[in-house]
Image: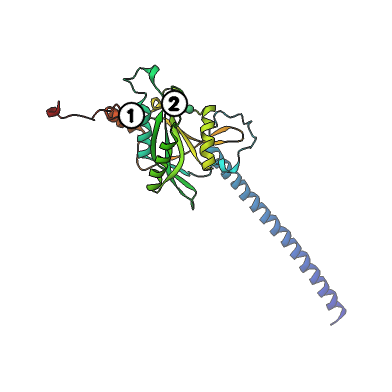
Amino acid sequence: MSDKDIINKEYKEKLKKKIKEQLKKELVEEIFQELKLEEDELTSEISTIIKNKPQPKIKESNVEPGVEITPPEFVEKEKNLFISVQAILKIASHALKYAHSKIPKHKWVEVIGLLAGYMDYENKVLYIEDAYPMGHGSAIYAEIKDYKNFVRAFNDIKKNNLFICGWYHSHPSYGTFMSDEDIGTQTRYQKLWKKAVALVIDPYEIDGTSLGFEIYRANLETREWFPLSFDIKGDLDVRMLPEILAFMNPIIEGKPAYLEYDEL
Ligand SMILES: [Zn+2]
């Protein structure tokens, strides 16, 4: 190899290296631009998702905006709560039994009962299957007075392969919020089962657009209520509910749904 050849070869190597570096730089630049573009797309995609996600309404809480104090078990991801049509109809008719139009409003009282359900642990979904009416109380407070009845209901629920997953009570005509007294009751249920839920129904909110109830869970430490989003298990059109309950009215009042003319 002549000196010239050596210089040539060296020059070639240098040139190659330079070209490689240039290519590398260009490639990195290209990848960088692509990633940036994707990131922009992703950012707008995510912000669209966030924008369209219905914001949970937090009632009766003093959470400052931007302050995340909700423990993970209270944070909802997907629909993980379902309630059956049977439970809805039982609860609504129980609430109306002690607060219907033929009873003077000042004599309306609250009702209370148990929620029976089962848990799909794999998918972390709770199904409220049935409601067990327990009793009724003073105008603004209902409690299960007899522990023996609780035990009886507990055994009946167990026989049906369900468990007590919470409780319900009514607020006839004064709304589906949860009160401070209700925290006391909820504490007992959440101590029995951490994920126990509380359903509150105002049958006078059932108007064809609303089911008239909300389901909550509480943070026992901060004594705050968190509304849970839920779905109906089975087919029930909310628009049908007032008509169904109107048809059930005689039964709710302790009379037959209808009589034949022969029976009159
Ligand atoms: Zn209450």
Mark 2 falls on what kind of element? loop
Q: Is residue 83 left or right of residue 181?
A: left
Q: Quadrant of residue 108?
A: top left
Q: Residue at 63% of width from left, 48% of height from top?
A: 39
Q: In this rendering, would 239 be left or right of 79?
A: left
Camera-nearest residue between 64 and 222: 222
Answer whether residue 55 is visible to the viewer in this image. Answer: no
Q: Residue at x 86, y 81 (%)?
A: 2
The reply to whether the residue tagged 2 has its Cβ within 8 angstroms of ligand 1 is yes
Q: Is residue 61 above or below residue 151?
A: above
Locate residue 113: give its quadrant. top left
Mark-to-mark CA distance, 1 and 2: 17 Å
Look at the image and tell me in which quarter the N terminus lies: bottom right
Residue type at tag 2 = His
Check disc 1 and report the residue beneath it. Answer: 242
| Residue 249 x %, y % | 29, 27
Q: Label 1, secondary structure: give it.
A: helix
User: Dot 2: within a 10 Å radius of its alpha carbon, few (fewer than 14), some, or many (20 or more) residues?
Assistant: many
Identify residue for label 2.
171
Examine the image and state in which quarter residue 109 appears: top left
- Spot the residue most to the left: 262
Of the residues tagged 1 and 2, which is closer to the observer?
Answer: 2
* Amino acid on which the number 1 mark rests in the picture: Pro
- Residue 65 versus residue 102: which sits nearer the camera? 102
Q: Position of residue 235 (x, y in %)?
A: 35, 41
Vertical arrangement, residue 152 with respect to residue 123, above or below: above
Q: Residue at x 53, y 27 (%)?
A: 181
